[in-house]
Image (cartoon, rainbow, N blue to C red):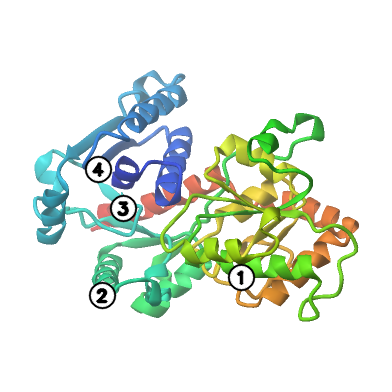
């Protein structure tokens, strides 16, 4: 079987966040388990900024094929450099099909909800989330109409749809009236580098680098409205103030709040809330960190808090659990799917509920330790190898459909 996979997202946006990370990790693990099929990676890109990732994929594939000499030729690339103007026209006209440019595959996986111009009818489409429909007030009307129409059309054209959570599957069925039998759920996973460390392994220089002194609560995610940092900061203010509106008094010093994540769109509200907080000296925005730094930041934290209003999956929750950290998280969308303990879920719109759940865990060391152990066990449910195996099964189902016709 010739497996076509569209890596345009990696070529244009990299492999460290979002769909790019999904595609890159999926490929690494498909390479490791599938010694039978040929992978044909295609993509349309505008600049050369991320082309080194192509060489990295070649090296990963070669390393996984060391014991299979005849397999080393089973990786092909059909990449097309273009301009933004030409790319827009290409998408609008749906011509030329990539097959006319030399691409050939039995099936085609489009892993970022858009289908490139193709004659191939055996398409697998991954949809990560439908946030642009769920949060219409954050988008322009033309944007919502355009992408709703395109994603609906693509979901109808695909033979199988992969959703990265049951929550996303439910949304696809609800908004596009898609047959649920057509949709497979394959969860994402944290990289194996996210692991529990012993205290003697902690790199405390990272704390010095980011000027973090003393204990801290950790939250991870892009600074944007959907991540809900305004409400988290308000909950933190309640914890610090011991307000009558808030939960009962916390016996002990409230740790600092450390937020790791790049600045995204419409981030002004979160930073304004921070500036207006009388406790802002105890709130630290780290910005973007490396994965290695993040592993240590998870391990050295007292607690992980994830206040997001909506997620297609919620990868930081799994990363935190894989590091053995107790988690308090939003009860919204996919996030409850990731946790096997529900007593620390909170209403993301209710700052008092967030504060109460944080305090419940901070104030009980035994509970915190128990939840950390549960996190480690629960994290075993998620692995990229498992995701790759499930995805390969889907490829074979779609390929068999072609053979039988």
Check disc 4 and report the residue beneath it: 43
Q: CA distance from mark 3 to mark 4?
A: 10 Å
**Crowd rating for badge 3 (residues with CA inside 10 Å; few <14, some 14–19, many 20+):** many
Between disc 3 and disc 2, whose residue precedes?
3
Q: Which one is in front in this view, the residue at disc 1 or the one at disc 2?
A: 1
Disc 2 secondary structure class: helix
Determine crowd level at label 4: few under 14, some 14-19, many 20+ residues with C-alpha closer than 10 A.
some
The residue shown at (67%, 62%) is: 339
Residue toward you, 109 or 87: 87
Q: Specify whether 302 is left or right of 77.
A: right
Residue that mark 1 sits on? 231
Please report the residue visible at 18 percent of the width from the left and 39 percent of the height from the top: 80
The C terminus - image quarter: bottom left
Q: Nearer the viewer, mark 3 or mark 4?
A: 4
| The N terminus - image quarter | top left
Of mark 2 and mark 4, the one earlier in the sequence is 4
Q: Is residue 25 left or right of residue 380?
A: left
User: 252 or 172: which is nearer to us?
Assistant: 252
Q: Earlier in the sequence, mark 3 or mark 1?
A: 3
**Helix, strand or loop at disc 3?**
strand
In the rendered view, tell whether residue 49 sits above or below residue 62: below
Tell me which numbered mark, 3 or 4, is placed earlier along the sequence.
Answer: 4
- Asked if one can make out residue 380 in the rendered structure from this viewpoint, the answer is no
Tag 1: Cα neighbours inside 10 Å, few (<14), some, or many (≥20)?
many
Element carrying mark 4? strand
Spatial separation of the CA atoms under disc 3 and disc 2: 21 Å
The numbered mark, 1 or 2, whose residue comes first in the sequence reads 2
Assign a secondary structure to mark 1. Answer: helix
Q: Position of residue 242 (x, y in %)?
A: 81, 71
Q: Which residue is mark 3?
A: 110
């Amino acid at each position: 079987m010739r497996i076509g996979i569209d890596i345009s997202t990696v070529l244009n946006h990299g492999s460290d966040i979002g769909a790019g990370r999904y595609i890159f990790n999926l490929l690494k693990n498909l390479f490791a388990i599938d010694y039978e099929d040929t992978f044909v990676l295609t993509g349309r890109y505008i600049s050369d900024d991320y082309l080194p990732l192509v060489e990295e994929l070649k090296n990963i594939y070669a390393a996984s094929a060391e014991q299979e000499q005849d397999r080393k030729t089973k990786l092909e690339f059909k990449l097309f450099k273009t301009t933004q103007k030409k790319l827009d026209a290409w998408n609008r006209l749906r011509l030329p099909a990539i097959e006319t440019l030399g691409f050939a595959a039995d099936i085609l996986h489009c892993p970022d909800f858009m289908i490139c111009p193709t004659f191939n009818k055996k398409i697998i489409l991954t949809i990560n989330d439908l946030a642009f429909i769920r949060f219409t007030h954050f988008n322009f009307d033309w944007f919502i109409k355009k992408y709703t129409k395109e994603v609906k059309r693509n979901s109808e054209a695909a033979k199988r749809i992969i959703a990265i959570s049951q929550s996303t599957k439910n949304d696809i069925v609800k908004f596009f009236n898609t047959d649920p039998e057509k949709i497979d759920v394959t969860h994402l996973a944290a990289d194996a580098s996210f692991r529990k460390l012993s205290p003697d392994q902690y790199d405390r220089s990272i704390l010095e680098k980011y000027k973090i002194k003393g204990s801290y609560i950790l939250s991870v995610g892009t600074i944007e409205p959907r991540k809900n940092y305004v409400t988290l900061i308000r909950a933190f203010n309640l914890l610090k103030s011991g307000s009558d509106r808030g939960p009962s008094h916390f016996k002990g010093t409230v740790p600092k709040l450390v937020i790791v994540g790049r600045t995204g769109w419409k981030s002004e509200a979160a930073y304004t809330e921070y500036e207006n907080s009388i406790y802002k000296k105890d709130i630290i925005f780290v910005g973007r960190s490396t994965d290695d730094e993040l592993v240590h930041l998870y391990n050295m934290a007292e607690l992980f808090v994830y206040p997001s209003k909506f997620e297609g999956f919620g990868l930081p929750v799994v990363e935190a659990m894989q590091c053995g950290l107790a988690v308090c998280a939003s009860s919204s969308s996919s996030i409850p799917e990731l946790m096997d303990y529900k007593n620390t879920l909170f209403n993301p719109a209710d700052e008092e509920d967030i504060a109460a759940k944080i305090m419940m865990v901070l104030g009980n060391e035994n509970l915190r330790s128990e939840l950390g152990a549960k996190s480690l066990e629960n994290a075993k449910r998620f692995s990229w190898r498992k995701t790759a195996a499930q995805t390969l099964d889907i490829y074979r189902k779609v390929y068999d459909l072609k053979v039988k016709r």
